[in-house]
Amino acid sequence: MHVEVLETRARSRDAPTRLAKRRAFVSFVAGLLAVLLVLHGTPALADARTEARSHFKKGMDSINAGKYDEGIGELQKAYQLLPHPNVLYNIARAYAEAGDLDEAVTYFHKYLDGNPPDKEEAAQVLKNLEARIKRQQAAAREAAQAQPPVAVPVPSADAGAPDAAPPPPPPKPEVPPADLGAARNEDVFAESIVTASKGTQSPVDAANSTSIITEQDIRLSGITKLPELLRRLAGVDIMEVTGGQTEVSIRGFNQRLSNKTLVLVDGRSVYVDILGATIWQALSIGVEDIQRIEVVRGPGSALYGADAFNGVINIITKKPGEGKNGITGGYGSQGATHGSLWASGRESEFAWRLAAGYDYLPRWSREVPNGRADVRTGIGDQVESSRTVRIDARGTRQIGKDTTFGIGAGLAQGSVEVLGIGPLNDIVLPRFVSTDVTTYLNAEHFDARVFWNRLRADNSLNVNYIGQSVLPARAEENIVDGELVYKLKGDFAKDLGNDLRVGAAYRYKDVAWTYLDQRRIEHHYGLFVHDELKVGSILALVADYRIDWVPYLERFQQSPRGAVLIHPSKQSTIRASVSSAFRKPTFLESYLALPIQLPVTGAAQVSEGVRREEKSFILNAERILSAELGYLNQESEYFVVDASFFYNRISSLIQLSENRPVTVGDFAAAGGQDPQTGLFPVGLGGWENQCQAYNVYGGEAGLRTFPVEGLDIYGNYTFNTAQQDNSGCTAEELSRIVADQRTPVHKVNAGIQFRTKPGFDGSLDFHYVGSQVWAEQVTNFVRQSIEQQRFTVSDYTLLDARLGYRFFGNQAELSTNAFNIFDVRHREHPFGQLVGRRLMAMATYRF
Amino acid sequence: MSRSLNPVVLFALVVATGAVACGDVPVDDERNDQRLFPARGVIRGTVTYVGPRPCSRDGHIVGNANVLVFDRRNPPPPVGIATAAQNFVSVPGDVLFANEPRSIGPSLYCPPSTPSITASAPFTIAPLEGASYHLSAFYDRRGRFWPTFKFRNLPEAGDVAGGYVDLEDAAKNAANPSYQPVFRPVDVGTPQPNTGTIPDFKIDKSGYVADNVPVTLGSIVPFTRPYFNARNAETGEGAETIGNALTSPANPTGDPLAVPILAMTQDAQILAVPSAPTAATLTAYQKSFLALKLAWGVAGSEAETATDPSYPFDLQLPPVPPSGNGGLLVFGRGGSIAENPAVPDLWPQVAFVKLADDPLRRGDPQSLVVQGTPEESVITGKPVGPIVIIQGITLLDDSLARTIAGPVPKSPSTAALRDHVTVLVKPAALCFDPRRVDVGGLLVTPHFTGISADSNETGQKPLFDKAALEKVPMVREIKQGCLPKGRYAITLVYPTGQAWTVPNEMGGCAPSEGSVVTKGDGSSCSAKPRPVLLSQGARAVLEIVEPREANRGVCDDNPVPDPCTKL
């Protein structure tokens, strides 16, 4: 096997990197121009949602004007682009109004096949229509029988001359609109989100800055690694640490085992309480299963409680019963593999969706070559970074008009390597099993949801000298999470609407991990209220408050949020908000008790949450206070503008504590050597709250435009600068602190998506991430201490591209995807692997 | 519109896929968190115990088989001067004696010492640099071993000692109580040609495993460590006495807890050996040396605390004969001191080891860090300096004349036990490069000649037999020069490798323990209260100070040689 040793890279890195960056940018611009030229002369398709929305609007206008054929045609185009039951209803209704009852019946049947909430009413309309058809047919038969026979004209020898003009067709019997129910005029293709308020709303009504990644964005990007989808968004920090580990944070403070952004799948938290991180590879869904991803920037504890520190990412999967069946497979660089298959169906009130998949991701780089006699590796040959087999099954049952019951389960199993922190600097989970069972009931005034997340994993160090080891361990986490929300929407008076949600939450956390001092069980409670008061169409006031009982802290944590929204127009908003959030210490930080072997074989530093020499010590929760001013304009059919400016005050961040050497005075408390390993504790570590705080100023500005059909261009810019406030530090603490600017000050994303009628489509995405200076904690083995050191990460550019070709009536598709097409070798974390180019060829078939 | 697959598209995709899938994952050798896992060495073997059944408590076997790794270029005393092992591993008693019955009660239970049992267990030590190593080992029967504390890091009476030794040679010398085992080398890596008697070893890119190394534990240690408290031989003042603030170059603030019990000038000069020794001239000769009295155990007022098992010290301090078998063993080494063939060389060996410079006592308030060790740069923020050692002359019963006259006990028997030992401080320092101790050190002394201790003799006489000194293995070169200034710890060493050093952790407070607070009933630490035994504290040092004003010319003419101040 050929192993490429990157030994000469250091000498000549800067110049090629600059060159590659320049090439990436030039290529991006050239690609953009090329696509524009191609599209200029080629019939193309617009952004699907925008185009469907346009057709829907035109169709409904035509129908209202009595131009039924034209209107129905537009609605059919909209439905072809993005199927929606309301469109079917309106087509059926238009046919009925136009008097084509047979087509109306056909479309009403299609509508009812989707088991809509108003199926009883629609079924009655259908019944009436069918009865009317029968009556018409009966009347026609009677009329035919009552008419006197007429002479049949004899054709003349001159066939070219008509004998007489044909009789005009009988007028179609139109159905009075009152018999068909109201048309579904609401803008069904308008963008909507659920994450910012726990209820469906337009982004212009959201109290936070929000972004959406659509199904089309996902498909056209060709990205198969879920968190990588988020890279295009402003204010979202993506860090490829290893081949299988991507860390995501919002508005900065990303880290290994990123723990400040709450990730949800259909509202279900997938936060791993042991580590306080999201293990993306342990999710049971693939990118093909995603309907959209909603990203809410800014603190979210007011709604979601602990850990929604700087934002919330909600992955909304495709609904059971919707969408097609399909299969996809891809293979690429270093054996990277992606495969998925999915099926969806409906049986009366019950809808279902099944999905399964397999992913294999190689490492970007490896620490040791094969054949080493002195080391032991956690996973075989140091090539595999993650491997996941997943299966996901979800179902819903409609109960009456307004109630939906849902149930589902997912399983992901495989391996992953994780660059953690402190004692878990470089670990592998050679085997993990992640499962969830979720059930919910959504009614008119209540939403109830209970889920069970379970994660079982073995873990060991990635590479270890023989005889040196943090002992392999086993972890099991069982989380049961329940939430009950009462919803009341109404008007106090004319132009004074109110939307109230009151909820209670409970989270049971049961963690057994070899590295903890003991099995730990926590009960976390929360109460929250969310209220939106709309004053006319101009002004809206949003207020939230949540109080959480955090068992580790043994005290309540409060998270208020308030926002004022002014709507200069229907689809634009100026938003001002103030919010706060907290992150509770994780199980790792709270209860770890792990002897970490030092280079001196028999000695260990014991990292522990419960300090043996100070039992009463507890960490404080990390806190953030945020103020934001935002502007969003979705008024135009051709562009969307989004801009936000924010100030964050961040304090009490949790970091590795200064090593506390075991002294003679600690003998009684230090407890002697570890009986299992024989290691002697020579130092005690763990975690502490930083004395320094951070004042973060930043903003995001983005534009997404659809200038011509088939072309979707986006660009956004992120600014983020953190000022460290060391006023709360002692002189001794100050001596240990170095400045941190781990969040790039400047970040630019830009890209294009295109779809053409000949079948070619694709995307080109450009990313620029500014340089960073990380204050990372490292172990000084001579001093036996944890030290902060500065590490610089150079700025880098990425150019990703996908080119696809659809055929067999758009059912089949072949594509090639390129990540980092110019192979700009870079690190996205100081200790991260050396990220390079990755290519993949994919084939997809939908049916 | 329905489209069919364009063959050209399919072909292009297949070719592209094949091309990109063939790459491999590159090795990253530039990571900046130093987790690059460079190729290193591993020593793997089996430790075999032959000795009494182990003690147990709470369902666990008490003690560990501790295997200590030393570079053969710098073995521990008495052969070398290493102050700490380069690496070690402890095989827990529960592992070594996995099948041995044990007590589940809370009290320590030690079964009868006979008959002996045999037990073995594997051990691994890594990572190691390429080098030739020597492995010494012992089983700490009381479970007191704690590697990072000087007062608990070496065997005591009852422990079972050994190592990777020449078993045949040991068997031949089984009856010799002064026998020092011959350690066999463990080479890690490939020897490099022309790099010395003990060559350099290089580890290639695949790493190196020295496998199947047998470590044997079978020698029961008869006596405990040479615990002592140091006192000025002239004044009788010990470190447990806190006097007035007195400044010195190494203690510019005059911290009373760091005022040395003995100071010697850089230009110290002794008398020359009398040609015809008499009791009077030998006394005069002895008096020309500065001397320390090293008394058995700790200061009297501290004895109870030092031996109380409820405190962390728990020293073995039996009374001296006839009440017990405690005391310092003073017996012959089988030769004479290099400077004078008439003076027999005695155990315990005495060495004064220069400590890292920390005049403000911020980094190392307990005076524990030895110059020339990696920890030195942590304390000083400067590059590591040379190892500097001043040797002492052990006297029998306080008298040079008595030492010469004899009889000197020949073995470490009860007859050799003394309640104290007097040592003379040689005005000479050996300066070693810590990287190549095996090539010997530079011996520096301020004077080569002096007047005789016999007033009847006139003129300058040689102070030592230079030719004899040059033959001492540890001496590479002899040079005239003043002694390096600074504080020197005091160490006593037995031929078993058992040693005791002051200052040690018992005598002061670590930075996180706070400062030493003295009240009527003893001393304690301010932040984490625990007893402090001041006799083992930072006063128990020899400080080399500047010459008196009148004699400054000596050091101007013969300054401290560079090899004694920097590497």
Image (cartoon, coloured by chain):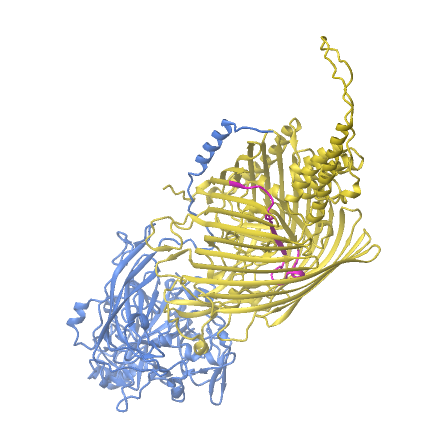
Chain colours: A yellow, B blue
Is residue A552 found inside the magenta-colored segment of the image?
Answer: no
Q: Quick check: can you spot residue B373?
A: yes
**Residue positioned most to the bottom:** B323
B366 over A104 or under it: above or below: below
B341 over A710 or under it: above or below: below
Which quadrant of the figure contains the N terminus of chain B? top right
Q: Quick check: can you spot residue A559?
A: no
**Residue A758 placement, left or right of B293:** right
Residue A786, image x, y percentages = 49, 64
Viewer-proximal residue, B548 or A14? A14
Magenta span: A298-327
Which quadrant of the figure contains the C terminus of chain B? bottom left
Residue A104, image x, y percentages = 71, 37
Viewer-proximal residue, A127 or A32? A127
**Quadrant of residue A560 within the rendered picture:** bottom right
**Residue positioned most to the right:** A494
Question: Looking at the image, how many numbered discs can be counted on the residues?
Answer: 0
The residue at the point 58 percent across, 58 percent down is A439
The residue at the point 44 percent across, 86 percent down is B241
**Residue positioned most to the left:** B172
**Residue B336 placement, left or right of B487:** left
**Quadrant of residue B305 within the rendered picture:** bottom left
A6 over A492 or under it: above or below: above
**Residue B525 placement, left or right of A199:** left
